Amino acid sequence: LGAASSWGPYLDVLPEDFPSVPIWFSDEDWSWLEGSLFRKRIKRHRESLEKQYETISELVPEFPSEFSLDEFLWARAAISSRVFGWNLPGLPVEDGTDFMVPLGDMFNHRSPKQVEWSFNKTTNSFEYKALEDIPAGSEILISYGGKCNSQYLLSYGFTIPNVSKRWPPVSTVRVEMALDAEVPEREPRQRWLLKSRLQEVDGELALEEFELKANTFKAAGAENMLAYARLLSLPGGDEFERRVKSRSCSRYATPPRCQQAMGLENELAAVKRSVHAVDAALAAYPTTLEEDEELLPTLSGLPLSLVTLRRDEKVVLRWWQRFFKLALEGFSIEPDLLENRTAEAFGEFSPESVYLRVSLPALLKVEREIKVSV
């Protein structure tokens, strides 16, 4: 319909392009994120969008003659950077949770929010209420929610400072764990893992990714990474099958893992694998956390956003580096010393240090008692 569409005036004021949204990044832009798994995440995201375009084109043959892939990606970027997520009254959940609001979706982000929005059932309209005095001619700011910078960048094309200092933590980083050469009976283990993913057993096993968040261990990425490392560290042969069928392991989880400790030797190997995974993630960056901190005040625009993201990732990695290396020390020091070092590093009452203060010492105690009884 073009200009004849009732939505024409709204579409006309939308940006012509979205250079700061990652699916449009240039090679120069990506160079700022060398070493970050965010690059791989966006590659998968773009491939998914391209697949959507292909699927629509197959179902609606005239679609590609009307809209190019770039136009489709532009529309997706316009939506992701402006969409509201809320259950609108009077509409089914599947119809009323994602929507755009002409003019109202053009306000930028600030936390804490300067203006809050709500839906008025009586007038069937969106309303915005100022929470503070706003001088005439000033920008109006709403909150996009408390997200980590990877989410802000993925959807909106920006990052914000000091996200890594928020409490409770919101910053995240993705870490890969490989099926390394030291895995017992590596080839059979690889075939087993491929089969568990319903893949061809002679195919290539992709690296497992885990999303880590500082001070978040239980039922989260860090605990799952350690649990996966336990499965990789299990002995081979019939012993592997016996253990993986036990209640301590979840062979049908994604990925398969052992949520409970499988003995002292296995736990030590699993912690070592976790240390290596975090160390490798940090080593993949060409710069250190300290170098990024020095660089940030000299930057602006998109480079500032990208270095902010990689800095935040390194803050989280450093946290888990301390955690897993202290766990590794725990196998060779006295429980009281481990308790003190844990309190110094993470706080005496940190719930996420339970593994260091309770689980690991309990495992060591059981193993010592077994040795004495023998």
Image (cartoon, helix red, strand yellow):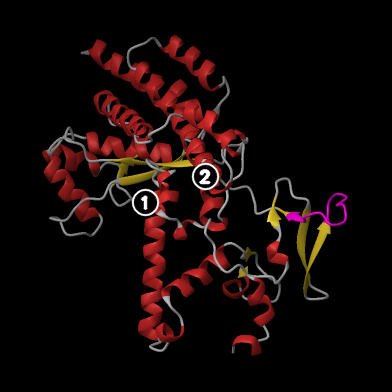
Q: Relative to residue 336, is residue 199 drawn left or right?
A: left
In the displayed structure, would residue 354 be above or below residue 206? above
Q: Please determine whether, in this image, residue 140 is positioned above or below residue 185.
A: below
Q: Amino acid at mark 1?
A: Lys
Residue span colored magenta = 130-141
Q: Quadrant of residue 37?
A: top left
Mark 1 or mark 2, which is nearer the start of the sequence?
1
Dominant secondary-structure state across the stretch colored magenta: loop
Q: Which residue is label 1 attached to?
A: 40
Q: Position of residue 322 (x, y in %)?
A: 44, 23
Residue 303: numbered disc:
2
Q: Position of residue 244 (x, y in %)?
A: 24, 42
Which of the two discs, 2 and 1, sits closer to the camera?
A: 2
At label 1, counting other C-alpha atoms closer than 10 Å, the crowd grade (few under 14, some 14-19, many 20 or more) is: few
Q: Residue at x 35, y 31 (%)?
A: 283
Which residue is painted at 12% across and 55% down in the image? 202
Q: Considering depth in this image, is 223 or 310 the residue closer to the camera?
A: 310
Residue 275 position within the rendered picture, expressed as x and y whole percent measured from the top left: 34, 28
